[in-house]
Amino acid sequence: MMTYAIMALAALAGGIIQPLTGFGSAVILMVAAQYFFDITIAPGVVAAICMFQSGIMAWNRRKSIDLKQILPPIALYTVCSLAVINLLGSMDLHVLTAAFGGFLMLLALYFLFIAKRVSLKPGLAAGMLCSGFSGCCAGAFTVGGPMMALYFVAIARDKDTYVANMQFLFAATNLTNLAMRAARGLYGAQYLPVTAVGVIFVLVGMVIGSALSKRMNGDVARQVVYIGVGVSGLVTLLQQIL
């Protein structure tokens, strides 16, 4: 029952933060999921949950999706993520879990201290760099949003286009990645109950977050979330090296 309760709370929090920032559900859910599933299984559970939220958000904003701009980076993102997923079975879980802890710490530090100072000029090189790096992170940990957010902000004509593009990316790539994880034995029917609970709560959170997004920006919520992410990353890393 503890697994379901914690995953439900994480899904609720992720559902709230995603409409405010364009991403975040996968990060929060992975922080929780790593304590109940090994690091090769957790991304599949998270991808299955987040796929529903992103799919609904993308559908609601479908008129704002700019396919001409985002299909090339999505293609590279997908190729890189599938390649990494294909390698997961041969990786050392101890090393992979430690790497995830370090990744969470770097992610938190980036968003707390660096993100607002970084701007990106849209172009082929920038798109390939962000897509390739994000795809590898998505394949390993189902967390591919940060670098893609940087690129999609640079190319989007307005906030609605940015959010729509991000959600279409997540919906499409989570679907393909989940299929690859299932084919590799990294996701199966035994995870459907916890997935169902996560989907219910992430959608409830999405409704709350969508209402909040009309009244506030996501800066304060983002700072609280990433402080928690950084602490969790530190704990995860220390557990693996001590």
Image (cartoon, rainbow, N blue to C red):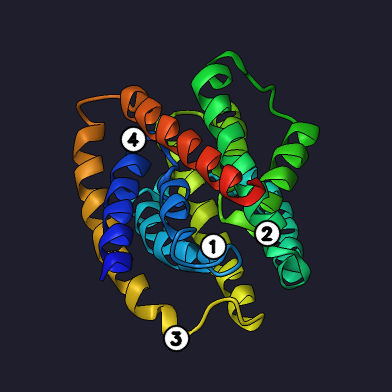
Residue type highlighted by circle 1? Pro
Q: Position of residue 173 (x, y in %)?
A: 58, 60
Q: Which mark is residue 189?
A: 3
* Amino acid under disc 2: His
Q: Is 25 situated above or below 140?
A: above
Q: Earlier in the sequence, mark 1 or mark 3?
A: 1
**Residue at the (26%, 33%) spot, across then down:** 213
Q: Amino acid at mark 4?
A: Leu
Q: Mark 3: which amino acid?
A: Ala
Q: Of the residues under marks 4 and 2, which one precedes in the sequence?
A: 4
* Numbered disc in front, either 2 or 3: 2
Q: Badges 4 and 2: C-beta atoms under 8 Å apart?
A: no
CA gap, disc 2 and disc 3: 25 Å
Q: Secondary structure at mark 3?
A: helix
- Mark 4 or mark 1, earlier in chain: 4
Q: Residue at x 35, y 48 (%)?
A: 14
- Tell me the SS state at disc 4: helix
Residue closest to the eye, 28 or 36 = 36
Residue 232 located left or right of residue 9: right
Residue picked out by circle 4: 20
Image check: 102 left or right of 204?
A: right
Q: CA distance from mark 4 to mark 3?
A: 32 Å
SS at mark 1 in the image: helix
Report the disc number at residue 94.
2
Q: Which mark is residue 208?
A: none
Cα separation between marks 4 and 1 = 22 Å
Q: Give the crowd class for mark 4: few <14, some 14-19, many >=20 residues within 10 Å.
A: many
Count up the numbered dots. 4
Q: Which residue is mark 1?
A: 43
CB within 8 Å, label 1 to label 3: no
